[in-house]
Amino acid sequence: MTLYQIAFLVAAFLTLIAALMTVSSPSMVHSALWLILTLGGIAVLFLLLNAGFLAVVQVAVYIDAIAIMIIIVVMLTQGAVRQQLRQVSRTWWGAAVAAILLFVSLLVIFVQSPQLASTAPTLVPSQETILKDLGQSLVDVNRYILPFEIASVLLLAALIGSIIVAWPIRRPGQEEGER
Amino acid sequence: MTEFLQDPFTWIGELLKTWLTGLGLASDFVTFLLQLLGALVLATVMLLLTFLLIWAERKIVARIQDRLGPNRVGPFGVFQTVADLLKLVTKELITPTGADLIPYNLAPLLAVMSVVGLWAVIPLAPTLLGAKINVGVLYIISIGAIGTLGIMLAGMSSNNKYALLGAFRTVALMISYAVPMVLALLVPVLLAGSMDMSTIVNAQSPLPFLLLAPVAALVFFISSLGEVGRAPFDLLEAESEIVAGFHIEYSGLKFGMFFVAEFLHAFTISALTATLFLGGWQGPWAAQYPFLGLIYFLIKTSIVYFVVIWIRGSFPRIRIDQMNSLNWKLITPVALLGLVATSVAEKLAVEFAWSRLLVHLAASALVVLVTLTALGIYARTTRKRSEQMPATGATSESLTSA
């Protein structure tokens, strides 16, 4: 076992622990903080798999997003910061069955996939080539242009929707500035 | 010895490498050890530099305000910061009741870590560079996110309402100013054709990007001031409103770490501006004599840093609604416009082999013209509206707070 493999296993183990703590921590804020550690662990895994771009994007996108999420947790849930919530609902077994089913079906799909089933590692081209390929595949008509554009339309719709939700309602006779 | 004078950094590195290999260590391990040593030296130098930065800032702000500033400890008061540090070390570390212990103690570490981490990708001289990451620009953004996280943790875990308010303001500020900052960062990436910082510096060899994209440089400078919560965007620690903001419950050296992070951040954004838009270490004979490159880099950074302090001494702190409307109504559209203008200009210059500088300057002039026209129209309508209803007072301001 090389040093590299040890590092990978340690990172994977820590990521799993953090993921477990995310769902089992009694305080919502702590859950969010554990989630940060989980996503950070995934970034480390990306880095070890020689995907530096994905690792950096993972940190840039998710950590800011979680900072916002913590704020929303504090603003939308009254006193949730201090509250110790019950971790187990009455239908926990249903959730467990669903989770196991999902895991097993994903495993079956992965094992059947010819690329993933082969144990021989595919040669990774240089970082620059991967990045260039990623960029071109997003605007290539034969590849991912449709999902890419649909995702951007979806985000635009979400943006417009949030603006409409936040738009002040003007009642007749109300002076401006009295909202 | 001439080799040492030409390129001291490579020379020392080679010397250490031969010495360590001579001790019988494996070459992989030697490389690892040298990288560790380099990181240690860089971080230590940066943190020691903060002593000088704090002194310089106090001195310059004092001059702007017609005072003398620190002048008792050492020549011109240079050692005032050392005395302040000694005082901070002797203070008790108080932990407030009900604080969330792990995040509370982690926050100052994250704050310092995020700013020191930025120096890893800044090329200090042609041969002096922490790490050559091919996504260096993205790395800067993601490390900035960790800084936000540190402040957020401090505010959440202190069990104090003022700290929480400060943290909320911080996140609002940093997340909104990250948008124009990223857009402005795209311009040097576009011009250099790479996200690697040293390639960006190399691409500025005849012309610094400040001349090619002055709009993007200005947008980057302003939004990075906002991103690090520097005056006039320092409302996350507005003393008159929320006492001290996120670090209200920290004392002693833990407070000192936030303090160091803040001052070093100001210097770091100056270094980033110098690297991305002023050409970094580029200068006459810098390629032959890397030490000269380091000096050029420090001079350029100091000039930008002086402007940062100058702004702090001159501008009043802006309100939160002004901050948001400035960002979303002015800086972000200008950044978008500048990005489009630069990409069109670059394409035209390459396609028709026109003068690159002239095309880019024309594009920037167009952006400035459009911006000024839009601002003029906005000012006119606002004035008209306030003339129509004088009784309600400053209604134009309240529009933005909706």
Image: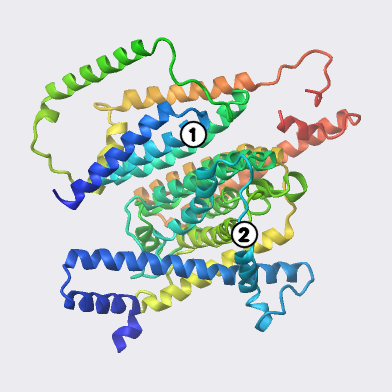
Both marks 2 and 1 on one chain: no
As rendered, which of B122 and B279 lies closer to the eye?
B122
> Callout 1: helix, strand or loop?
helix
Residue for badge 2 = B252
Frontmost residue, B182 versus B109: B109
Q: What residue type is labelled 2?
A: Gly
Count the labels in the image.
Answer: 2
Label 2: few (<14), some (14–19) or many (≥20) C-alpha neighbours in 10 Å: some
Chain assignment, label 1: A
Q: Where is residue B190 in the image (x, y as percent from the top left)?
A: 40, 49
From the viewer's perspective, tell me whether residue A81 is left or right of residue A147: right
* Above or below, B68 relative to B356: below
B36 or A167: nearer the viewer: B36
- Residue B31: image x %, image y %? 24, 66
Label 2 marks which chain's residue? B
Q: Mark 1 points at which residue?
A: A30
Q: Residue at x 53, y 70 (%)?
A: B49
